[in-house]
Amino acid sequence: MTWSAANRARASAQETAGLTEGEAARRLADTGPNEVDAKTPVRLSSRVLAQLTDPLIMVLLGAVVLTLAIADYPDAVVIGLVVLVNTTVGVVQEIRADNAVAALSALTAPHARVRRDGALRDLPAAVIVPGDVLVVGEGDIVAADAELAEASAVLVDESMLTGESVPVDKDAGAYLSAGTVVVRGRGVAMVTATGAHSALGRIAALLDERHEPTPLQRRLAALGRVLAAVTVALCVLVFALGLVRGLPLGTMAVTAISLAVAAVPESLPAVVTLALALGARRMAARHALVRRLPAVETLGSVSVLATDKTGTLTEGRMVVQRVWTPRVTAELSGVGYEPEGEVLVAGRTAEADELETLTDLLTVTVLCNDATLSPPDDAAPEGRWTALGDPMEAALLAAAAKTGCPEPAKLSVTHPRIGEAPFDSLRRRMTTLHKAEADGVLVCLKGAPEAVLDPAVLHDPPDVLAAAHDEAARLAAHGYRVLAVASGLRADIPSPVAEAESGLALLGLVALSDPPKPHAAATLASCRAAGITPVLITGDHPATARAVACHVALLGEGGQTQDRVVTGEDVAAGRVADLTSVRVFARTDPQQKLDIVEAWRARGAVTAMTGDGVNDGPALHRADIGVAMGARGTEVARQAADLVLTDDELSTVVAAVEEGRRVYDNIRRFLVYGMGGGAAEILVMLIGPLLGLPLPLRAGQILWINLLTHGLTGVAMGAEPASPGAMCRPPRPPDQHILGGGAWQRLLLLGAAVTAASLGAGLAAQASDLAWQSVLFLALLAAQLGVALGLRTRLLTKENPFLPLSVLASALLAAAALYVPFLGSILETEPLGWEGAGIALACAPAGFVAARVVRTAFHPGGPTGSGGSSGPG
């Protein structure tokens, strides 16, 4: 198993590791070919029920009941179809997203080597029980919490639990956690905990919370309640006024119900679903997989982005960046384990003698090394080199290749290893013995500076050791992991090997780090430009966190609270009065990450949390938007998240935020358009009789107008492109109503403008002794179609040709209502001549002009080209 394969496979350990034998037996018994089929109907019914309990859908269902009660079957069918389409699209999109994540997470369940009844068995991790004896080796996933009874140079990657990118050395007596990966050495361990009692189980317990409604869901629910109340009141008013004027009871009942449908933008659920689905599709094309459809819009309101370090802001792989020797200091470029990069001394390419000095040092690190590098293959992600073993040792191999050192395979032939003293947490150094080219033994040593830069180990002059100590301290302060390297010759093979660790010559220091990604700083700058506050939360060392934060411009040089690094211990001890005043947290555990997210949410922020490890799961689940890494992320992180980044790039989150703002802008634009048109229809019905138009519109005419304006045309508005300044404005206030930011004022103005134009056309037709009701019908429809085009941010854009085409189709269907005899008889319209049609069609440019004037009105921050503080509408 390659290192990258182990890194990916460990994700599957969460679900299968740590079950009691009884639980495992029940699980295996319950699992069969029909398991999915048995569960699918329950899941499907839950999805459908969730769609149908949306407040606006419930209003529409009420309208269906009313139309059926009065035997208005055609209208009932139309409204029912809207509900059906909306529900179907929403359910299908959620199922597709879940299936895509399931495919991403389809990893083989790990097995474990277990000693039972005196025999070594290979068993599924799911059947491991407390008391079992595990045998672990390089590349193995630890199947359960266990205590090491025997350990030989065991090194364990615990980043999925702690967030720290550097593996941890484990001796006999140390504990292993389920799901972690052994990257070096061998060991025997006794299983101590499984299931809920394991480290994974305790973290999983923090995930046991239901998902709360998204900001969009909350806003639409509030709007639905208001619309329901207003609709009922207006319908009762119109019904009562009709009866007072002596109109038939049945006629006014149908008219009141028709106005109810007109007042409610019944296409809103379809528009919302289409906008979210299109947004999800665009995000998928940009490497962001949406697991829950409403999360698309929520991204647009994110005001705080809490990100982890390893693999998100950084490459997630150790790299040698600096090499110091008493003679020369060099910088190495390149990322990952690829043996490609420049060797620079004082900003220039290293000269031959300088390169020779560096090669001598790095050749020793190749010999004193147990890792291996593999070139890209079909299994390697994105054609990357992969490593097996300690990531630091793998980074040393890559650095050696950059300086031109002989390949490890050749060195193993010319300098075969004849002895070794493995690294352990007490000695903090590793020594290997090799056959020298001449008779003798070559001693190669590397380790922590404090364990190597010791006169008992080195024979170098005090001034050289002092300079090395100063340089090591300086590098460590900048967040580097520092190794000291030494070598020497012996005439004989010492026994034990540790006796060779004296009288050696210092070759130099190697500084390694998990470097920030090239575009990390620009990504965070884009966040700040969009009004999003970035916060770094990591389990790594404070010095490392500070170094990365400074590199990506997350921390300043001042002494403000925002410019300091706070540890998880500080958070747990309550030494930080306001967690939202801190921008960098280090050494945090899952509960503290959860506390930080909760603090921001309590302040009213809409939070997004990125992560890839099990330790990130609770915070991902609790944040308004959880963003998991798809390539290197664990199964726990992916299942807890709303968004999965298939490319593991933080910049993809920024692209997703832009899509979220686009979606919300389009929804608001439709609300202004649809509700403005509905208001105009109601005002026409209320004011018309006062101006001498007895029954301005018949029920069928109202429904036809509503179908053409709110249906095809309204849905097309959900695909409008993003506003040019979408990422240059702050997020909308979390408590802002969906019609806030001036939207409801624009809505009323447009409603008044359409009403005035339509009634004016109707009165003009009446004065000219024309079929005024048909003129009013066409005028009201034409004015609303003009508004639909006038509200566009980019009038001549080719990104959404569906909108002008839908306006054209609606215009043709409007003409059909007048000139097709069958429709004319149903809708009770009359064909219009040139004069009547001209009066009505003049309302289209009037609606267009009104929309262009109103779209940027009532904007507190000045025009944005989108018509509102939070976007169009």
Image: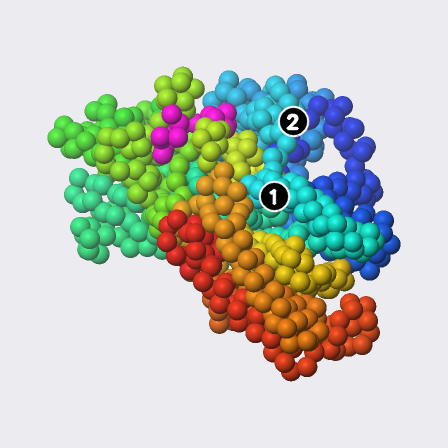
Residue receiving disc 2:
18
Which colouring convention does the figure follow?
A: rainbow
* Amino acid type of the residue tagged 1 in the rendering: Leu
Q: Residue 156, position in %: x, y?
A: 49, 31
Residue 215 magenta: no
Residue 580 magenta: yes
Q: Residue 566, position in %: x, y?
A: 35, 27
Residue 501 sits above or below residue 440 on the image: above
Q: Residue 568, position in %: x, y?
A: 41, 24
Circle 2 packing at 10 Å, graded few (<14), some (14-19), many (20+), is many
Q: In this view, does 491 lie to the left or right of 576?
A: left
- The answer to whether residue 294 of the structure is visible from this angle is yes
Instruction: Find the magenta span and give its range.
Output: 578-596
Kindly identify the residue that appears in the image at 67 percent across and 47 percent down: 234
Residue 548 sits above or below residue 136 on the image: below
Q: Identify which residue, 613 or 330, lies in the foreground.
A: 613
The numbered dot on residue 223 is: 1
Kindly identify the residue that appears in the image at 66 percent across and 18 percent down: 131
* Amino acid type of the residue tagged 2 in the rendering: Gly
The numbered dot on residue 61 is: none
**Earlier residue among tags 2 and 1:** 2
Residue 282 sits above or below residue 544 on the image: below
Q: In this view, does 288 lie to the left or right of 445?
A: right
Circle 1 packing at 10 Å, graded few (<14), some (14-19), many (20+), is some
Q: Is residue 854 left or right of residue 486?
A: right
